[in-house]
Structure formats: structure tokens, C-alpha cells
Amino acid sequence: MTGDLKPAAPAHRHIVVMGVTSCGKSTVGATIAERIGAEFVDGDSLHPQSNIDKMASGTPLNDGDRAPWLAEIGRRFSASDSGLVIACNALKRAYRDIIRSGDPSVVFVHLHGTRELLASRMAARPGHFMPLSLLDSQLETLEELQVDEAGVVVDIATPVAQIVDDAVATLPNLAGRSAKNNDAAPFNLDDDAVA
């Protein structure tokens, strides 16, 4: 009965879909979660109201604002016995380290795009709490995945289906790699991105 066979799920099932605002974290994250049979959580929903109010006023969050939010994301991974995909900007290495403190096996899918593409996407999102003025702040804050971090960089200029295909195809290669034992650079599926 070969018709009943399903493709094997990726070995790695705790995933952060990361990147600056408007890169498509929620869309890609939800699609990856559906594809691998995992739960999806939009990290924005885990922010305390004080953080949302601050961002809505155009004030960038500081590390103190982010720490409890990032710790909650790490706790969610730690408490999950099954697949979990969380969309979260994870802009700095220190932020990703906080998340990994909850689960060292978390892998990152970094959605990378040009400022122009990101700004055009932001302009098309009326009503979102993040104003365009914070895009440059996030781009300045962004620290690319380091060679000892399990992850993949994907170009957001491609269709969502291709982004998800590329990310899911790479996940089995990241299984078992963590910040402590990852001895190779992050996979980079965008020739123009710096990993």
C-alpha cells in the first residue's frame, strides 16, 4: 500500500522563523508548521502589552523589554514534547541564546530581504502595531546567524512555497546541530545574503 505512505517528518521539530519586521515570519512559520505537522505560535502574541504599546508609539524595545519575552519563547520550546514553530525576530545572537537556553536543539530559519522589499511590505500592512520607522532600527540591530548556530538563511524575494520547500528540505541536515556542536556555517539559500 504505497499510497498510504507519508514522507518522513524532518528530524528537527523545534524551529524559530526569524527576521526583521515584514519579512514573512508568520506566513512562513505557519506554513512550515502545517507542512511538518507542528504547532505554530506567532511570537508577537507572547509580548507583554507594555512592549506592544512601546512599539506602537515608535519606540524601539531595549534588551530589558525583550528578555522576559525571549525567556517565554524558550520556555514554550522546553515544554513542547512535539513539533513547535515560533515566529520571532531573534535579531541578536544574545536573543537566540536566551531562546536556546530553553531548548538547545532549536534551529533558526532566517528570512532575509532587502530594505526596499521589507519597506514595501510594511507599507502594505495597515493597522499593524509596528511603524515603518522601526524597520531601520531592526536592520541595524540584526546580527546574522553565526557559524556555531544551527540555521538556514532564505531569500524572501522568492514565493512562499519555495521558501518553505527550501527550509523544510534543509531541516534534516540541521538535526543534532546546536550552538555547542555546530561546526559549519549556517546554510545559506540566498547567494546575496551574508550568513
Image (cartoon, rainbow, N blue to C red):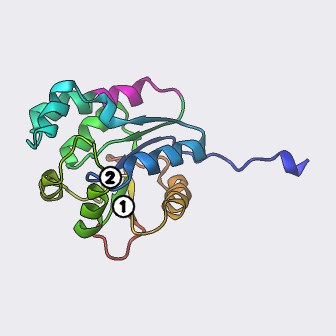
Residue denoted by label 1:
186
Q: Residue furthest bottom?
A: 191
Of 131 and 30, nearer the camera is 131
Please report the residue visible at 40 percent of the width from the left and 69 percent of the height from the top.
Answer: 157
> Residue 171: x percent and y percent?
51, 53
Indicate the position of residue 39 as horizontal and vertical percent values: 51, 33
Disc 2 is placed on an element classified as: loop
- What are the residue bounds of the magenta stretch? 72-81
Three-letter amino acid code at the position of disc 2 = Glu
Q: Quadrant of the C terminus?
A: bottom left
Looking at the rendered structure, the kind of residue marked 1 is Pro
Left or right, 36 with reference to 108: right
Q: Is residue 130 magenta?
A: no
- Classify 10 Å Cα crowding around label 2: few (below 14), some (14-19), many (20 and above): many
Q: Which mark is residue 114?
A: none
Is 78 magenta? The answer is: yes
- Is residue 175 shown above or below 104? below
Q: Toward which corner of the image does residue 121 lie, by quadrant?
A: bottom left
Q: Main secondary structure of the magenta part?
A: helix
Q: Is residue 141 left or right of residue 191?
A: left
Judging by the rendered image, the residue that carries numbered circle 2 is 149
**Circles 2, 1 touching at the beta carbon (< 8 Å):** yes
Q: Residue at x 27, y 55 (%)?
A: 122
Q: Residue furthest right?
A: 1
Up the image or down, 187 lies above or below 128; here it is: below
Front residue of 70/159: it is: 159
Residue 56 position, x and y percent, is: 16, 38
Q: CA distance from mark 2 to mark 1?
A: 7 Å
Position of 16 with respect to 35 (left or right) is left
Q: Can residue 108 be seen in the rendering of this structure? A: no
